[in-house]
Image: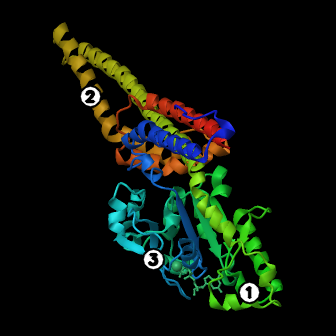
Amino acid sequence: MKRSGAGIGNQESDMYKKNYIESLRNELVEAVQKNLSPVAIKYHYSDVPLEVSVKWRPIVLVIGNYSSGKSTLINELLGSEIQATGQAPTDDSFTVITNADSDGNKSTVKLVDERDGKVLLHDEQYPFSILKKHGDRFAAHFRLKRVNSPMLDQLAIIDTPGMLDSVSENDRGYDFQQVIGDLAQIADLTLVLFDPHKAGTIRETYESLRKTLPASTFEDRVVFVLNRIDECANLNDLLRVYGTLCWNLSQMTGRKDIPMIKLTYSENVPATNQRLKNKEDFLPLLKNQRDELRQRVLDAPRYRLDHLTSYIEVHGVRLAHYLEAIHLYARKRFLYKLKYVVNSVAISILLAGASWLFIVSSAYFGALDEVTAIGASAGIGLCGFVAAIVLMRVQFLPMFHHSTLKQIDQITECPTQARKDSWNAVKTKVYDFLDYNKGVFPRSGIRSDWKNVLRLYEKASSEARKALAEIG
Ligand SMILES: Nc1nc2c(ncn2[C@@H]2O[C@H](COP(=O)(O)OP(=O)(O)OP(=O)(O)O)[C@@H](O)[C@H]2O)c(=O)[nH]1
Ligand SMILES: [Mg+2]
């Protein structure tokens, strides 16, 4: 990987740094495209090229309870009422909001056009093809809005339906938590919004984030926000709500240290305006962290490089583990067949020998000449061998296949937590692959593909980490 511009250090202009980051980003995407994707597709690790999820612009995902103020926050960031807002669950769609390419007047921010989910899921320029698996019900709740907001020059924002209780979640007709997990994997930053009325009712969503995001980048990629704090009656009430949220988060994370929670409210809501003017109220005493949140959103593109690097690492490790598993399965099957064939040859020879003894000692066949007797016993031995091979194909190999699939966890060794994690991520894919082709697939090349993936991802990741350290 060539690194243009490295070493210029502090004198680097912002422009130069931006170009450097851009060229590094392109090189990393190319590394995925050239080295990981062809192998991932060849062995059905992925149906779509891996770079599809990372080659588009940086993405900020906004999730949270219904009416926690997601759409209000997004409108505020964009500087226009692009998303519908309102009390009670308002919006049941996932909306990708990105910029319109038009160079027209950007002083008035407005919606330029809207596309429906089906187009979005099938258009290769967008990174959403992995969501096709969620079916038509999901596609009907997925759309793209193009807006001429300068805020969107470098990023896209995804507004999501408000989370409901898990009973109502089941009525959606698609797996909401899985969609959130898939989107969080593509996103460079996920904002998780709570409001004082429902502080901490998103356990399942938290779990799907935890499962899909690499542990190493989780803290950088998820920001918790306690929004609408202006609705707390007083400071004591706010402390009570904050305490409840901290407690719920620590229950979800299983950790005692609480992640940073941004305390925010919208100053555009009329009632809040009045409270801000009222000096006896607690609101004027408290810093609204809205600006910090805005800055965090604007910084999302900077995290894209880290994201891309960990994407290469995560998929490099998983793909290598996947290939190792199917290589070991193929080797085990080959050794099983070899042992079976050797045993069959031995038994057939014994059978031929026994037949010959029987023929020469039998009063009935004793009259046969020697060549015919040898030919007849060799024929019996051969028939025995053919029968054994047929039996192996129709009976023993399927039995071997099913019992290996039943004990799929024993295919590879997982002595460390990292190995267990990568195995858990690929186990179903390995099972599906072996189940689909019934264990019959070309064995040659898997081992070298596996070793190549290991070598190439380690090289790409170490060079990217070095470059990231240089950028600082
Ligand atoms: N007091 C107060 N009201 C807010 C604040 N943010 C949003 N609201 C109001 O809360 C209601 C819900 O806001 P939305 O932005 O629609 O919430 P949402 O999370 O997008 O809701 P769904 O799309 O239904 O999940 C609206 O009536 C907003 O005007 C805030 O910070 N303070
Ligand atoms: Mg909304």
Tell me what residue is drawn at x 68 percent, y 84 percent.
Answer: 197
Q: Which kind of residue does numbered mark 2 sit on?
A: Val
Q: Nearer the viewer, mark 3 or mark 2?
A: 3
Compare residues 348 and 46 and report the one nearer the observer. Answer: 46
Above or below for 300 versus 118 = above
Tell me what residue is drawn at x 83 percent, y 84 percent.
Answer: 236
Q: Nearer the viewer, mark 1 or mark 2?
A: 1
Instruction: Give the residue pinned by disc 1.
Output: 276
Q: Which mark is residue 172?
A: 3
Q: Residue 317: where, in percent of width, then height?
A: 55, 41
Q: Earlier in the sequence, mark 1 or mark 2?
A: 1
Tell me what residue is drawn at x 55 percent, y 33 percent.
Answer: 3
Q: Alpha-carbon distance for marks 1 and 2? A: 90 Å
Q: Are marks 1 and 3 in contact (CB under 8 Å)?
A: no
Q: Residue 75: where, in percent of width, then height?
A: 54, 76
Q: Secondary structure at mark 2?
A: helix
Tell me what residue is drawn at x 35 percent, y 37 percent.
Answer: 441
Q: Residue 460: where, in percent of width, then height?
A: 54, 35
Q: Secondary structure at mark 3?
A: helix
Above or below for 188 versus 341 = below
Q: Earlier in the sequence, mark 1 or mark 3?
A: 3
- Which quarter of the figure has residue 254? bottom right
